[in-house]
Amino acid sequence: MNYKLKRILFPIVSFVALVALACTCGSPGVTPTDVPLPTDAPPTKPPVTLPTKPPATKPPIGGNNGGGGIEVSADIYTHSSGAFSTALPVAWTLEERSDGIYLTEDGGSSAMDMSFTQVGVELTADALTNYINNIEFNWFGSFADYVEQAREPQDDGSLLVLKSLTTSDGTSYDVFSYYWQVGTVVYEQDFWATTDQYDAYVDGFVEIANSADTNPDAASSSPLYEFRYTFTCPQDLCTFSVPYGWSYGHDETSYEFVINDKFTAPDGTSYIDNTLYDDGKEMTKSDSGALARFLLKQFYAEDIVITDDAVQGDGSERLTWYSSNGGYSGQSFFETRGTSFLMLTWVVNDAYFDLYSPIWGDLLGTYEVP
């Protein structure tokens, strides 16, 4: 087989004013197919010095303490789903979850994780890069002192991403991850070594990485983008769950008093907007309905056709709509709380409606008002 890690490189004014402003600013809306795919790497901080010793030639699976600091078991573990199998360190504590495993070193601080994510479609190279960027930014980037040090394609088609970070207890880690796609499933291996242990542990981790085998068919029934986090709305007005693998964007510049948070699928065919408008004045239900319809046409398309308008049990209102020329459709929920107008919108290319509908349904199911 082709081995991983041959080497590591370290190297709203008021509503009326908002309408008037729209006449001069133009529409910020885009169709789903025009959503730019976010390929920028996560923001970096000043680099730190990492160990530069390359890994030694990999020992055979089951070698006695082959990694210097890790004894690799000769037994192969298979996840209960059947989605993957791998060798594991001897005497480490294993925790299995529905989308993977997490192991911690008994009496130490190092760790490893292997997971799989059903993304529903076979991602293009650019979309897979977006997915990786999103995981790095949304998950690893949430740790202090996160710095991406290197990316290196591997002989087996996976991508190595090396970074350093600091956990909440002040421990400094060097972490390397492998990402690769098999069919519609993206696999990920993460190896965490405290900076002072890296040289001793890296070879054992590489041995474990090379032992992995995958069965994407076994992951076919897994929830789409199961790895998720809780997003908190501006002013703490709401919370809901979104996939780590989707990009996050925040915009306060389109219109005065308007804040928009956007979550976009890696392939750009679906996104979710969370929009807040607050000019300090309370709004009638009639005004809020007019504002919702205005924003639909400004943000998404002038040819929006509303097919359903339904008041919900919690007092919010749901608009179901489509663009007659754009080939996409969506739903918007809006409500007012005091002076705040909130609108949550899902937009999707019609061809991907059934694929991404569960993501939208799950988000709505987790939506809470603190």
Image (tube, rainbow, N blue to C red):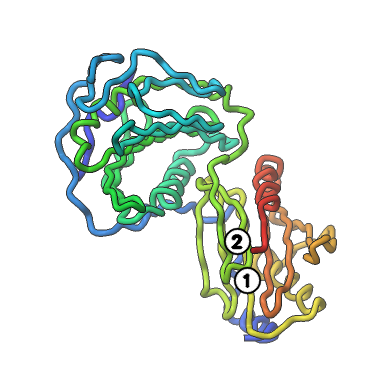
Toward the viewer: 177 or 204?
Answer: 204
Question: Can you tell which mark lies on residue 233?
Answer: none
Q: Nearer the viewer, mark 1 or mark 2?
A: 1
Q: Say what secondary structure mark 2 lies in.
A: loop
Q: Quadrant of the image for the N terminus?
A: top left
Toward the viewer: 15 or 81?
Answer: 81
Q: Amino acid at mark 1?
A: Leu
Looking at marks 1 and 2 on the same chain, the residue that comes earlier in the sequence is marked by: 2
How far apart in space, not on screen, are marks 1 and 2 (Cα)?
18 Å
Question: Can you tell which mark lies on residue 276?
Answer: 1
Q: Say what secondary structure mark 1 lies in.
A: strand
Vertical placement of residue 333 versus 184, above or below: below
Vertical placement of residue 22 versus 169, above or below: below
Q: Which residue is mark 2?
A: 30
- Point out residue 17 in the picture as x, y percentages from the top left corner: 65, 86
**Residue 267 appears in the picture as rendered:** no
Q: Residues within 10 Å of mark 1 (few under 14, many from 20)?
A: many
Point 83% across, 58% down: residue: 307
- Point out residue 13 in the picture as x, y percentages from the top left corner: 62, 86
